[in-house]
Image (tube, grey):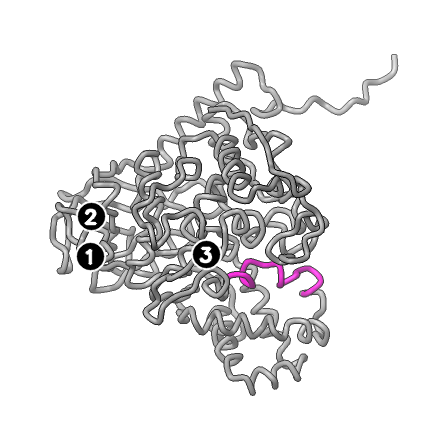
Amino acid sequence: NAPDIRPPPRRPTYESGAPGAVRARFQTVALAIGKSATGTYEHQPIDINREIRILRIQHGTTGDLECMLFPSALQLSNGQTSSTTAKSYPYIALSYAWGDPDEIASNKITIYKDTGARGVTQTLTGFNQSGTFLIHDNLKAALLSFRHPTKDVSVWVDALCINQRNKIEKNAQVARMHEVYTQAEKVCVWLGKCKFQYGIATIERSTFDFLQLMLDLQQLDELVADPEGAAGGWAMVVKLMKNRWFSRRWVIQELALSRDAFVRWGREDLVWKDFADSIALFMTRYEEIKRTSVNPDIYKATDARALGANVIVHPTVNLFRKSNEGQIEQRLLPLEILVSSLLLPFEATEPRDTIFAVLMLANDSQPSFANPSATPDPRIIPDYGKCLVDVYADFMDYCIEKSQSLDILCRYWAAVQTISKLEALKKGKTSTEKMPTWIPLIENSAFGEPRYLPEGRANGDSFVGGLERMGQQVYHASAGLRAWHEFGTRN
């Protein structure tokens, strides 16, 4: 008999079809891990339409993070508080990247009971403990950067201040997200904890120093004229523009609506205006820098023009007209263009946020200044309990009605539902949800999914174009006829 040279059978995995008993054991283990991966703290109820929670980081220099959550009222346009039971307190709003969905939260922070004291520094004991949270590495590093040796610091961070397990609360708080960032004393853009050295200084300090050098136009000319001497600096700027924070879809709203923003990278801070101006100046000289570079491999591997950092540096110029006091007077772009064209470089961990994260930026999805009491369209109200296909179907239905065109069917914008392997085991299904063929996936857009942007163009432009081809559209999906459609839903 001929020897059996077939490869040994693969060990069954959950998604490759493990036997029922094995699948059940996988799922039991996943559920047990899932229960321990959030901590023991139970959020206290708040008025979810009028209040938010604020996280007070207790002072200290060593040991685990110790914090307190307490309610704070949102302010009305006349400066009065919207709540009858809580006052309004100052805070810093954190804008950060959640991290890899497969990362298991393992960093413990202790949450203390609300003592009611607000304007004083407190020293708490074990008798005040209420429970624990387990958080990801990036959030832990951000909160540690705010911890002060002698003073308590108040921040707002979505992962902790919103009860993520309560979908009713999450829906209501997401609808108020614009107020959270508008009313924050400051917005901190957290780029992460840097681990690298550049010469005798940290790379974040060296990068920020180089960005500030570029703000002097004469210095910028000299840097561009000296490609060999400036090579290290340009490489740091490109590396910075690939930071994960710049790919988040929520950052557009968080920045555009902030009164005072700053960038924090490791231990170093830089005001947002200086940061944005230096990146914008870099992009005005990008082709010349690329052409004369002594290290061309950096630019072959990355098309900086496609990165989110290039889009975001001046978001208010493209999105709003603002008063001298910073108040939004006019929104400039419709929801369809924001979702399907302008904001393609930005990803969302939760795919429903492809739409929900930009609702407050669109000129057709919110009550107008002339009619502020108008009821929002129910098809696009944030609802995280709604099936993803239904969220997309309602959005496309909304766009077709508004534009009287089927062009949204030809623009590639929709992200798929990708959950961690742990969540897939807990829920008993594969990690990627399949979409109907009539939903145009972002993987087919010019640069593909946001995570692949640094690799350059992957596909041709959409036939119907987008914001970058306004006035040059060569194809209409409904050929100028009145659009008609009917979508099925899953409920």
The residue nearer to you, when weighing 357 against 456, is 357
Contact, mark 3 vs mark 2 (Cβ under 8 Å): no
Sequence-first disc among 1 and 3: 1
Amino acid type, callout 2? Phe
Query: Residue 337's spot in the image, x, y percent?
Result: 55, 50
Which residue is under mark 3?
252
Distance from the alpha carbon under mark 3 to that under mark 2: 27 Å
Left or right: 70, with 137 as reference point: left
| Dominant secondary structure, magenta | helix
Query: Residue 140's spot in the image, x, y percent?
Result: 37, 52
List the single residue furthest toward the right. 1
Q: Is residue 66 above or below residue 240?
A: above
Q: Is residue 352 above or below residue 433?
A: below
Q: Nearer the viewer, mark 3 or mark 2?
A: 3
Sequence-first disc among 1 and 2: 2
Left or right: 392, with 475 as reference point: left
Q: Residue at x 51, y 72 (%)?
A: 207
For label 2, the SS is strand
Q: Residue at x 20, y 50 (%)?
A: 73
Query: Residue 108's spot in the image, x, y percent?
Result: 32, 45
In reply to whether residue 490 is colored magenta, the answer given is: no
For label 1, the SS is loop
List the single residue furthest toward the top. 1
**Residue stretch in magenta:** 299-312
Amino acid type, callout 1? Tyr
Which residue is under mark 1?
89
The residue nearer to you, when weighing 122 against 81, is 81
